[in-house]
Amino acid sequence: MSAIITRGLTKRFGDLVAVDRLDLDVPEGGVVGFVGPNGSGKSTTIRMLLGLISPSDGTGEVLGTSIAHPEQYAHRVGALIESPSFVPSLSAGANLRSLAALRGLPAKRVAEVIDTVGLTGRERDLVKTYSLGMKQRLAIAAALLPNPELLILDEPTNGLDPAGIVEVRTLLQDLGAQGRTLLVSSHLLSEIEAACSQVVIIRFGEMLFSGPIAELMAATAAHVDVAPEHALDLPHLIELYGARGWGVRQNNNHLVVAAPAADAPELNRVATQGGITLRRLSAHEETLEDAFLRMTGATDHDNTLIRSNQRAKRTGLFSRHLPSTKKEADDA
């Protein structure tokens, strides 16, 4: 079953195509990361899913109901899409009780969500005394008031210090373990990797990847840096590794071997058997951030070229000099 499905979802603002024929399929249960460079349409997509803006084209469903009728599923969805806004001179509990009353929700939910986000004992404190991390947890508590099946969070760790980030990450993992579906947009790729089981990557409104993080990482590049004790041994070492089928390139005084970390012991044995002593052997595997930058563009300059290429394609003025991928940007 899918919590969110879109087919050809598109949103235009004049000449700007913010979301371009997006096909989403978010499974029920667990935490799904939603990432992309600035201006990639993440917030626009979220607003269409919540019924805050209408798509220009395409269709979508949230919890089995068309996004054309958000009033039919709004009570089953919780959302945090802006910085949390509370009355600072009221306590956390009073703020939540007011929100519950406005939404016609039972008052007992206030104590339940306060406990869920770990603010029990601080509910009588004024919100103005809360740290930013506590305010963010309070905002998530507000989103949880209707006991939603789906929770959509836009940048829930934005501006938090390391301790606050860890608190929110743990909370998201706990909520996902309860069987809820969480769609989490974030710029912190390390947090997405730590908290999520699935990831959706978009670039300027277009889908680049959707699926398990493990599947994405299985296709990432890995290499081992190998440095012999004596630089004169580099040519011999290249021959030894090449004969065993490893891809090798020299980078100054060391070799970069296209091999997973698990091959490091064998690389050491081959060198030893060839009479070469190594002074350095270090394995490197891509993180989600590495994979993300490789897919989307490592710099603002890359992304400017990529976006220009997309616009040129749409207007029929495509130029081969405008790269459409990170690799093309690197090669340009």
Image: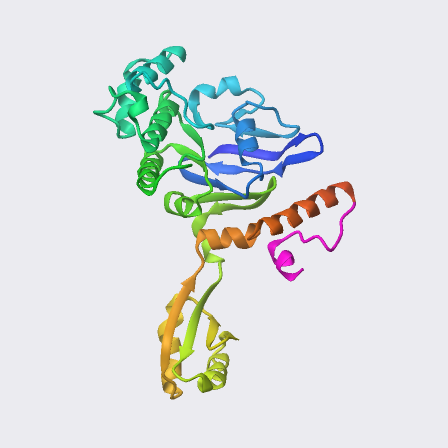
Q: Quadrant of residue 280?
A: bottom left
The percent coordinates of residue 78 (x first, y second) are 42, 25
Was residue 324 drawn as part of the magenta stretch in this picture?
yes
How was the colour assigned to the protein in this rendering? rainbow
> Seen in the image, is 145 located left or right of residue 77?
left
What secondary structure predominates along the stretch shown in magenta?
loop
At 74% from the left and 55% from the top, the residue drawn is 320
Q: Looking at the image, which is closer to me, 38 or 216?
A: 38
Residue 241 appears at what percent x and percent y? 47, 79
- In the rendered image, the residue lying farthest to the bottom is 275
* Residue 329 x %, y %: 64, 56
Above or below residue 2? Residue 277 is: below
| Residue at position x 25%, y 21% in the image | 125
The question of residue 250 being in magenta is answered with no
Task: Count the labels in the image.
Answer: 0
Quadrant of the rendered structure where residue 109 is? top left
Residue extending farthest to the right is 316
| First to last magenta residue range | 317-332
Q: Where does the image place residue 199, in percent across and percent down from the top left?
A: 47, 44
Depicted 220 relative to depicted 265: above or below: above
